[in-house]
Image: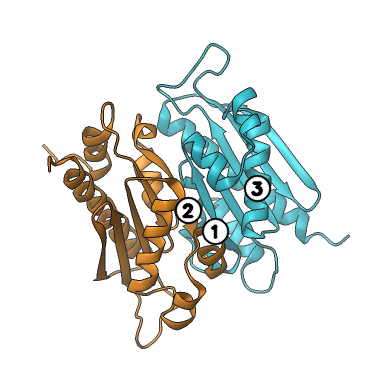
Chain colours: A cyan, B orange
Amino acid sequence: MDAPSAERRLNDLLAGGSTITFATAESCTGGGVAARVTSVAGSSDYFLGGVVAYANDAKANVLGVPRDVLDTRGAVSPECAQAMAERARDLFGATLAVSTTGIAGPGGATARKPVGLVYLALAGPDGTRVEEHHFSGDRAAVTDAAVERALALLVEGAEAALRPR
Amino acid sequence: MDAPSAERRLNDLLAGGSTITFATAESCTGGGVAARVTSVAGSSDYFLGGVVAYANDAKANVLGVPRDVLDTRGAVSPECAQAMAERARDLFGATLAVSTTGIAGPGGATARKPVGLVYLALAGPDGTRVEEHHFSGDRAAVTDAAVERALALLVEGAEAALRPR
């Protein structure tokens, strides 16, 4: 039997009794993380919502990523991923928030930021964790890999938040 | 040959030279409209971003849908769809914005609001148009139909915005 999908695992962990909620802040995945989460009935128990911040102005004006981060580090940077996740967590009042920002391609790459470079961040009650990935393949493959990793981060975050302290 | 997809048609209309932009405000489609739009390379030319406002608090606090609308008409109402689209248009500073709010099922239905009931709105420079649909099928079918109709509304809006006056 196949392992359950990450969105199903989130549902198993969080639907019904838990008070743990999450939100998303997506750039390169373009809404794909939220779409996977909400494909499962009952996701409204724990998914509050998300921002798809595709343009830099949306990252600054809607999410509240500091302009300074965008100007000096760029939208595809660990600092931007961290700010996106932390701002989404605040904005939605969620326990956890995950963010994605990267170069899905085929355009947009630079010498220092190649196609497939994706930063993800998970913000939670114990702080924020940022990851750098280099995914291979075309636009769809990079996006799918980033969505999958974002969902896995949410599963890890949910499991940690559910653990007795 | 198949007709081009709506997201490809949007790219054909808006990528490159045009100054027309759009944003999304999604409830029942959960990010699926944004994900379809951003699956096309070059969509950053015209797609600014979106809000997935799944919880009522997200509709009010992040998008700015008036509490009064949510309390008296409900989240699944023409008034809510209209406010979502208009608020997203303002928030992102876009030419056009499309919204979706409905009952994807299997839960959440009431006697007056059955599974498959979806309101969509398109806000643009000439005002806002709201539609009521009754889509059939399961959660995935209702969501897919709503995504498809939202994309078609954006195509119509883009064509109208490009027409000489």
Q: Are marks 2 and 3 on the same chain?
A: no
Give above or below for B89 relative to B162. below
Q: Position of residue B29 (x, y in %)?
A: 40, 59
Which type of secondary structure does the marked residue at label 3 adopt?
A: helix
Q: Residues within 10 Å of mark 1 (few under 14, many from 20)?
A: many
**Res B62 label:** 1
- Tell me if label 1 and label 2 are in contact, CB under 8 Å: yes
Badge 3: residue crowd in 10 Å (few <14, some 14–19, many ≥20): many
Same chain for marks 3 and 1? no
Q: Which residue is mark 2?
A: B51
In the rendering, which numbered label is found on residue A86? Answer: none
Give how far apart the Cα atoms at labels 3 and 1 are.
12 Å
Q: Secondary structure at mark 2?
A: strand
Would you say A13 lies left or right of B10 here? right
Amino acid, disc 2: Val
Which mark is first along the chain, 2 or 1?
2
Residue A135 or residue B82, whichever sits in front: B82
**x, y percent for residue B163:** 14, 42
Which part of the image, by quadrant, shows the C terminus of chain B? top left
Residue A72 lies, in percent from the top left, at 64, 23
Task: Tell me the subunit letter for badge 1.
Answer: B
Quarter occupied by residue B15? top left
Residue located farthest toward the bottom when viewing the structure as drawn: B111
Q: Quadrant of the N terminus of chain B?
A: top left
Depicted A110 relative to depicted A157: above or below: above
Q: Which residue is mark 3?
A: A87
Taking depth in this image into account, of A158 and B10 the one nearest to the observer is B10
Measure the alpha-carbon separation of dots 2 and 3: 14 Å
SS for callout 1: helix
The residue under label 1 is which amino acid type? Val
